[in-house]
Structure formats: structure tokens, C-alpha cells
Amino acid sequence: MTTTLNTVARLLTTPLVPQDFFDLINPLASSTDLRGRIEAIEPETVSETTRAATLRIRVGRGWRGHLAGQYVRLGVDIDGVRQWRTYSITSSITSKPLQTSHITVMVKAVADGLVSNYLVDEATAGTLVHLDHATGDFTLPSPMPDKLLFVTAGSGITPVMGMLRAHRDELTDVVLVHSARSADDVIFGDELRALARDEAIRLIEHHTVGRPRLTAQGLTELVPDWKRREAWACGPGGMLDDLETHYAAAGLSATLRTERFQTAAIPTGDGGAVTFTRSGVTTETNNGTTLLAAGEDAGVLMPSGCRMGVCFGCVVPLRSGAVRDVRNGDLTSANPGDGVLVQTCISAAAGPCQLDV
Amino acid sequence: MTTIQNKTVSPIDHLSAEDIENLGKELDAIRQQVLDTRGERDAAYIRRVITAQRTLEASSRIVLLFSLFPSAWLAGTTGLSVAKILENMEIGHNVLHGQWDWMRDPKIHSTTWEWDNASPAEQWKHAHNEEHHTYTNVIGKDGDLGYGIMRVDEEQPWHPFHLGQPLWNLINAFMFQYGIAAYDLKLGKNLKSKERRNNPEFRARVKATLRKVRTQGTRDYVVHPLLSGPSAMPTLAANVTANVVRNLWTHSVIMCGHFPEGVETFAYDSIDGETRGQWYLRQMIGSANISGSRFMHLMSGNLSFQIEHHLFPDLPSNRYQEIAPQVRAVFEKYGITYTSGPLVGQVASAWRKVIRLSLPNDGKMSSARAAERPIAAVAS
């Protein structure tokens, strides 16, 4: 019966689908295209050097819930262009994910960050956003270990904040070592200090203004029983590398889980190595070579058309890296997880890039 | 008309090679200026048009459930006709051109869009974006010059078949969406030989088109009428009417793009080694605009700015009207005629040509054919 109804509904609306019309009424009701609506944006810190905000997002139908510590890809239209970025979910979880109507994510404005600055400064309540399902394995196990150690720096606190909020009642012995520029720069500073006052966690703040960065060696002095603790670390790559080396040296790699935030900076240059992922071919290109010519020369079966930027018959997804429009020099870039469609006949590599063809 | 290469007086003879390249640079600058300011306002525009079109289509179809009442029939049929025209012209044609790809919205993207037309988007994009927009008005390369059933240029050879072309054009106007589908399939050429007929790729494309024709026919002529219960027959009539109105309108608008007097054509070999400036120049003198109201521009999918569209097929359609004065200034600066006229006059002009060329040329053309010269040679 349902399938018959579906068939009729599809016939009524072809070449569109019924959902296209329902979207006119309520875009959040779609179960095929996950969307959300920003309901509130609250500034999270007061420091001049760190600006961050918590976004409260009403999630659409079809949201499958999340585990504390996971992240979500968020698509926002900025100046008409959809941009996707990944943010850690900081809201608590409910035991019944289908009842979850809201999530919160924390966004820290990064220098020159298009999306983060937009979300912190310009976005308003009511803005429609696009979502992927929550994902990531930086989560706490069940049953919960007795002794935990969290090592975070800067915005690396966000997934851990989600864990602390969600599992507060199950945690017995938690040490959190958090590194930030100053006390004012600690995101969720008030909430973390309140948890410490209530003895829910032991909080060690390391402020870096005028002091050296926290090293793994320094950490072992701050937390003498670190070897007996299951550890979760999130922060800059250098810090995580240092920790991983340290844990490996002690033969304790299995007790350390790390979460690396993707860097937004994509290397750009003139020309570069182009990888055609489906074909398994990588070829070096110079500044003047279009992606289409490079692919064809390398024996890749490239879609093509007018070869002059007019017909859009040659578009393929750019999975990562940056390309330059040879007509006017405009750059287009993609982060891993993206699939930005680019016209290969008028684009040249601007640094290493990956094409899904 | 005669291809520009064979004219005794060419409208671009006064332009030096340098002029043509400079003109190209000026047009590039106009394009860049649009790209630099393209953003939220444009995205909001296309989303608004899509929302309005879908709302109009849905409400018209709901009204038609009661089309037993003459007023409901009239309102529903009018609404559906307008909705279908918007869907094909301002939305479908332009989305399939990739004009909105920059938004990176998979729901409004040339690679995912399908439209309410017998020709599947994939096939239409190939025939239109790739062939027509690249080889615009080049005799023997641009099939849009007469769609393979008509002779719209003196240099296209005359055949007795062309005697009937006013009638062919009229029939094509009424069934335009099927005409486009047949044209995109290159039906005439592909049905000729057994080898072509049996080409698996051709057969697959025919299948895709037939599937689409069937689905859309079922929608308009079976499901919606049945749903209307006692209003079934009036709804059927309404849907037929809306499709015919859409066909007639789109056919007329599209005839105005390249067929009216004043539009130039080009010889087969003339575009070898064409520079960007020369390509621009060919688009400039190979297209004609329609003047009229904002509503007319919207309903024509801004193809009333055919010149601007052919210069910049990938710029958002809402910008053509804005840049038209700048484009026109470039025409004036370089002494090129900007062909434009009101809809009725342009349609009449195109029809006159269809009728005139149904007869063979007066003899001057066929006997004394000037040596074919490439556009570059004309320009130098």
C-alpha cells in the first residue's frame, strides 16, 4: 500500500519528487536530506584573543543521534555558496536519540576562517543549515574505565566537554589537563571550573602566555599516575604527535586516543600533483596544464565537452586540494569530505589535489 | 542570409585583429565584474523563483481538481501554463547551463537537475550546451539552425522537402518538447542507416527519452486527471493546453534567438583556430535580443537577452538584464549592430525567413559563391 502510494506520489510530481514540495512547507521534515535550523548563537568566551560561540541547532527529522565526543559536518550558505565544515557536538545525549530535537556545537573563530567567523559573528537565529550524521570514534567506551585523563588544548576541549556533560554521573576519577593562552581564553572556562569545584573532575589549566607550551614530559609531572589512566587527547597536531611518541615509548599506545581537527589551510601553488582517485593515477602538472589535459595525457577517461568553459560537460568532484581557473586566476578549494564540482577544461592544479574520476 | 564569410559587405570588416582582441578583453572584464559580485542576492533570486514556480504548479494542480467549474479550469490552466514555462525557461534551461553550480547546492545543480521536458537533461545538455553554444550559427555544425528540418540560411542547400517547412515549423511549435527530444537524439541522422539505428548507445538514449515521455505523459494525461474524479476530462484538457501553451511560447522565444533578420551565420571552416575575441564576436553578431517588460524577460528565461546569454552562458540569468547596457556600449564602441526588437516583430521576422527560404534562392547565391574565408581573414 505504501509503495503504491509512493509510486503515485512520484508520478504526480515527476521529474521532481514529493519531498521537493514538502520542503516548501517545512525543510526540517525531510528524512532524506538532513537539515537543521540555528535557534540560538551564544558567545562562549570573553577574551579578545579567543572568540567562540555555541550554536543551538534544531535538528530535522531523520537525525540518528550522536555519541558524546563525535562531530558533525555542517553546511552553511555563505554569500550564496554552500560551505561544509566539521564541528564537535557539545550537547548532552538522550537515551532515545529520536527524541533529540536539538544539538549544540561549539565554533571557535579562526584567523581568516570563512565559516567559523561567519557563524560566530554574522549568522543569526533562524538560519537553515545542512547536516551530515554525527560520526567519529573519539568516544568513551562502555563500561566506563575507572580512571580517565583528558589532555586538550584550545578548541580541543569541545569533544571532551560533550563527554563530560553526557557522562558526568558515570565518571569517578577524571583529570583534565587543558592548555590555553590565558584563563580568559579557556572555552567553557566557567563550566569546567564549576565541575572542578564540585569535585567531578580534577582540572589542571596550563596558560601559555609567557610560558612554554605543555609537553608530554611536563604532563607526566602534572599527572604522576598517567600510566594508569585511559587517555583521550584533542588539540593541535604537534601536541598530539608529542603525546603519541611519549605513549609509544612507554608501550602504552593502546591507552591513548587522539582526535585531530583537520586544518583548514590548503596548500596552494602553481601546478602540482593531480591524483585521479578512481583511476588510481597521479600525475605532476605545471601551471598552464588544465586538469582535463593532464587527465587525458595520463590515460584517464575524462568527461569532456566544449573545452572552453562553456558547457559544464567536464565537471568532476574535487575531493581535496585547490584548483585555479585559468581564465581569471580564481581559486577553488576542497577539504577532505567535500566533493566540489569543478570544470576540468578551464582549471589547473594550484597545489596537490584529488579528483574523483 | 549569407554566411558572413561570403558577404560582399561584411558588418565586421572595419575591425582589426587587435580590435577583436580588445573587444574580447572588455567583455571578459564585464564577466569578471559579475563573478566578483555574485553571491547571496543571486542565490536568493533563484531560490525565490524555484519556490514561486513550485507553489504555483502545486496550487494550479489543486485548483484543477475542481476544473469542472469553468473559472477553476481557467485559473488552473493559466497557472499551470505559467508554471511550466518558468520551469523550462528561467529555471530548467539556466540551471542546466550550470549558471547556479557555483552555489554548490546539489539540489540546484546542472549535474543533478531534471526538467519537465521530453528530452532528458543529460541529452539536452550535450546538444545544447556543448554543440549549439560552442558552434553557434556555424552552418553544418550548429544543428539549431533549422533543427535539421528547416532551411534558415541561404547557404543551407535547398531540397524540395523545404517547401513544407512553414508547416513543419508550425507542427514543431505545437509539439516543441518532442521536437527537441527528437533533435537531441539526432533522430533524422541516426535512423538513416541500419548501423546507426542499431548502435547500442543510440538505442539506450532512445529508451531513456521514451521512458521520460511515458512518465511525463502518465503524470499529465492519466494520474492527475484520474485524481480529479468528476473533473477528469477538464483536467486532461487543461494539462494538454498547458503543455501546448508552453510549447508555443518556448518555440517562439527560441526562434527569436538566432533566426530573425540581422543575425549573422558563419561558414563551416571559419572557426578553425578561432581566438577568444573572435568567439565573442561570433556570439555578438549571431544572436538577437527581444525587448519587453520584466515579466516577459522572466517568462523567456532571460533568453530575451540572448546576446548576453551567448556571450556568458554560465552567468546567472538575473544578471543579463543588468549588464545589457554595458554590453550594448561595447557594440556601439566597435560599430557592431546590437540586434533587438519587440517579441511580435522578432517572431514575425523569423517566420518570414522560414517562409522565404522554403523556396530555393533566387539563383545569385548558388551560382556565384565567393571563396570561403575564415572569420579571422574577414576581420584583418
Image (cartoon, coloured by chain):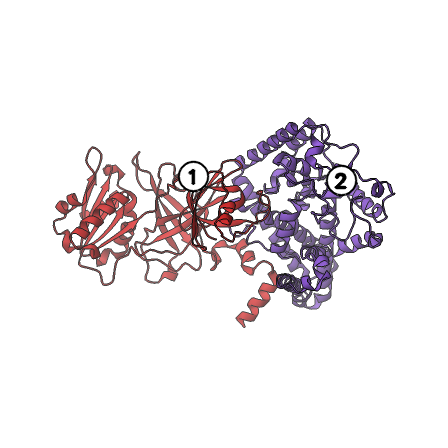
Chain colours: A red, B purple
Residue A172 in percent (x, y) is at 18, 57
Quadrant in the rendering for residue B72: bottom right
Establish whether labels 1 and 2 are both on one chain.
Answer: no
Decide: is B334 above or below A207. above
Q: Say which residue appears at 68% left-offset and 60% top-offset.
A: B64
Residue B3 numbered mark, or none = 2
- Residue type of the residue flagged with mark 2: Thr
In the displayed structure image, the side of residue B204 where residue B149 appears, left or right: right
User: Which quadrant, please, contains the C terminus of chain B?
Assistant: top right
Mark 1 and mark 2: span between their CA atoms? 56 Å
Residue A30 in percent (x, y) is at 48, 58
Q: Nearer the viewer, mark 1 or mark 2?
A: 2
A255 or B269: nearer the viewer = B269
SS at badge 1? helix
User: Which quadrant, please, contains the N terminus of chain B?
Assistant: top right
B290 or B311: nearer the viewer = B311
In the displayed structure image, the side of residue B205 where residue B363 appears, left or right: right
CA neighbours of label 1 inside 10 A, class few (<14), some (14 to 19), many (20+):
few
Residue B365 in percent (x, y) is at 83, 41
- Residue type of the residue flagged with mark 1: Glu
Circle 2 marks a residue in which chain? B
Residue B46 in percent (x, y) is at 58, 45
Q: Label 1, on which residue? A: A122
Circle 1 marks a residue in which chain? A
Decide: is A64 above or below B305. below
In the displayed structure image, the side of residue A26 where residue A210 appears, left or right: left
Q: Are marks 1 and 2 in contact (CB under 8 Å)?
A: no
CA neighbours of label 2 inside 10 A, class few (<14), some (14 to 19), many (20+):
many
Residue furthest bottom in the image = A1
Residue furthest front in the image = B371
